[in-house]
Amino acid sequence: MAIRTASWVFLGFLFATAASAAERPATPPSAADSFPVATAARLGGDESQTRFVMDFTRKIDLRVFTLADPYRVVVDIPQVAFQLPPKTGESGRGLIKAFRFGLVMQGGSRIVFDLTKPARIEKAFVVDATDGAPARLVLDFVLSDRESFLRRSAAEAVAGRAGLPQANSGVARGGDPRPLVVLDPGHGGLDTGTKGPHGEEEKDIVLDFAQRLRERIEKAGKYRVLMTRTDDTFVPLADRVRMARDAGAALFVSIHADSLPHGEGDARGASIYTLSETATDSEAARLAEKENRADVIAGVDLKSEPDDVAGILIDLAERETKSYSVQFAHKLAGEMKGVTRLHKTPLKSAGFRVLRAPDVPSVLVELGYVSNREDLHSLLSDSWRNHTAEAMAQAIDSYLGSHAVGARAGTN
Ligand SMILES: [Zn+2]
């Protein structure tokens, strides 16, 4: 039996090739059965020592690192098909509060563990399949303390952990002078976003919606469209902003769906958010905090993200961008109210990380509430999606048509 034991630090680059966006295959493999399949996962032990085991149809490589505040352990593995029972990972045991898993990019999957206490990984290895038994990924968590946890985490960072790959903006700068609209379907991969009562996932609803919107804009032919994701992969919030900035976008539209926790009222209708340092109300603040958690959920180290826009927040250009964003938000509300129900206060603002491009007018649309029965019905309906996408395409055309925004296209 071949066992791969790898100590904490040396796990570093077993998986380095997949961490490079430049090496993403042009046509990602699509046949799910070409990937190893995760078939089961289980936890054992207690609050001093906890073991995690996941079964695979064949052996895989792995890379492990830790993140603090909240305490997390992140395991990067090659792309696998997760065929696990529903609710797997939602509850934990011992040192593991919960865990999530999913695609982070084409070619790469990730498992993120939320810890109850600081812990170190004593062992991380993959056992080959032997007759009858599947290949197994085994992680042993041992109780540690905050200081050692932070020290190890820092050592990993020094050892050159790259985190997620830089977003590939993938923009053809081939002299196409048409203004560029960046559509940003929220969440993706192991960050599912909010969930409906029967497991409907925000990440799927908003991706389908954004694709319909893209088709409409492209069919009219006046604007180019770039999507921050076109499949079920995770994209960090800062990369979404970076894509729009690098590509010289004229407009950035982030698309989401909201939900209220059970028992906290029954809000419904679409809302359109712009960026502000202070939220318009507590609900807007709650929502921004929830949407900003995407990076934490997917195991992105926020401290490693250069906050390159924080310093320019009061810049003139930014003020102008903000006023454009608000104008566009008004146009969106105007077009959308003809086809769908709007929230009772549809125009709001809060500190959404994804709206922080200082030079790209940006809005975040919450299409509706998956926690509301009528809204969910709409969100899942073909005709509602088509009509609402049509209305948004109208608003985009009306906004871009009324501004000399084309000047930004083709710059850089
Ligand atoms: Zn969302």
Image (cartoon, rainbow, N blue to C red):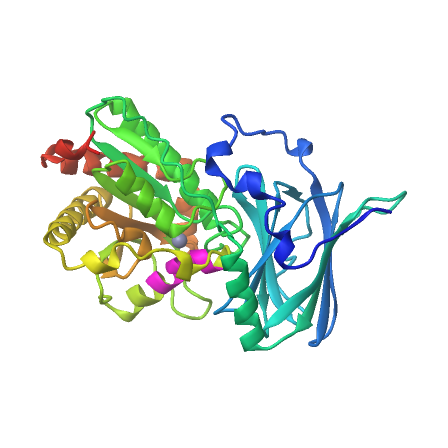
Task: From the viewer's side, name the closer residue of 296 and 332.
Answer: 296
> Is 374 positioned to the left or the right of 393 in the image?
right
Give the x, y percent position of residue 50.
71, 69
Coordinates of residue 125 in the picture (x, y in percent): 73, 54
116 vs 167, nearest the viewer: 167
Residue 14 belongs to the span the image colors magenta: no
Measuring 51% from the left and 53% from the top, which residue is drawn there?
Answer: 161
The residue lying at 64 percent from left, 68 percent from top is 120
Say which of 394 and 351 sits in front.
Answer: 351
Q: Quadrant of residue 30?
A: top right
Which residue corresponds to the image point at 74% horizontal and 43% vertical from the top-left? Answer: 59
Left or right of 294? Residue 329 is left
Which SS does the magenta portion mostly show? helix
Q: Is residue 293 magenta?
A: yes
Question: Could you say which is closer to the camera, residue 104 or residue 290?
Answer: 104
Q: Quadrant of the C terminus?
A: top left
* Residue under the image location 44 percent in, 70 percent down: 263
Q: Which residues are drawn in magenta?
A: 288-296
Residue 367, visible in the rendered structure: yes
Q: Position of residue 383 (x, y in %)?
A: 37, 35
